[in-house]
Amino acid sequence: DTAVSQTPKYLVTQMGNDKSIKCEQNLGHDTMYWYKQDSKKFLKIMFSYNNKELIINETVPNRFSPKSPDKAHLNLHINSLELGDSAVYFCASSPMQETQYFGPGTRLLVL
Amino acid sequence: GQQLNQSPQSMFIQEGEDVSMNCTSSSIFNTWLWYKQDPGEGPVLLIALYKAGELTSNGRLTAQFGITRKDSFLNISASIPSDVGIYFCAGAYNTNAGKSTFGDGTTLTVKP
């Protein structure tokens, strides 16, 4: 009965590779998000989708492309991975525009 | 853009002590939220505040929405070891397409 789930939990890959992270929520929320948390623990929003429509797109390199096949899923694809992409990526969902429910995170390490 | 200053950046306290932390903004919000992140986990919502001056409790936690709408405070009474983690404040303005701005976090360490 997991609320917001992400796969994989850990991802170790080489520079230049392309990878995807998947997120699913079973809470019936309309809005989903991707956040990046760096080594200093700063939490920065990357994207937000409402009912499969992109509503927030912060200043993120276009190597990052979110995809929402339905309102319960928001995946993140990253092309040409760079060392600086190493971070923890959190998916979140929200029933309204404020309170958010976070997934457990995906720890990405680019070598 | 909006900025949130959260302080202190870190705290080392003895079990049983009370804790206070705060968040200030360069602009107003109409919602303030406090989250806690345990090590290795995602942030979890602790308290949500929707009205200026509002004071809300959740067990040993009490949070307040500042009168100016530019600040919020979180107090933890009688700290215990499981209070360890990172506490984030977040502000939201409901015309901003669902975007919450997060503070940089306060890392709390509780010594038994």
Image (cartoon, coloured by chain):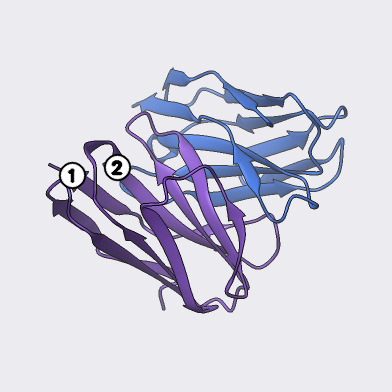
Chain colours: A purple, B blue
Q: On the picture, is B66 further left or further right than A34?
A: right
- Residue at position x 66%, y 68% from top? A95
Answer yes or no: do the residues labelled 1 and 2 have beta carbons within 8 Å? yes
Output the chain of dot 2. A
Q: Residue at x 18, y 44 (%)?
A: A110
The disc at residue A93 is: none
Where does the image place residue B34, in percent across and percent down from the top left? 61, 42
Label tally:
2
Secondary structure type for disc 2: helix
Specify the label residue A85 is tagged with: 2
Q: Residue at x 14, y 52 (%)?
A: A13
Q: Residues within 10 Å of mark 1 (few under 14, many from 20)?
A: some
Query: In screen coordinates, is B70 left or right of A11?
Result: right
**Of pointers 1 and 2, the one earlier in the residue sequence:** 2
Q: Which mark is residue A110?
A: 1
Residue drawn 48% across the image and 26% down it: B16
Q: Nearer the viewer, residue B12 or B101?
A: B101
Q: Amino acid at mark 1?
A: Val
On the picture, is A101 further left or further right than A110? right
Asked whether the viewer can see residue A73, the reply is no
Q: Is residue A39 above or below residue A59?
A: above
Disc 2 residue type (three-letter): Asp
Residue B102 falls in image quadrant: top right
Local secondary structure at mark 1? strand
The reply to whether residue B22 is in sight is yes
Which chain letter matches label 1?
Answer: A
The CA span between labels 1 and 2 is 7 Å
Percent of width and height locating residue A52:
57, 74
Locate residue A106: give its quadrant. bottom left
Residue A95 sits above or below residue B56 on the image: below
Query: Is the N terminus of chain B in the top left, top right, bottom left or bottom right quadrant?
Result: top right
**Residue B7 image point, x, y percent:** 57, 20
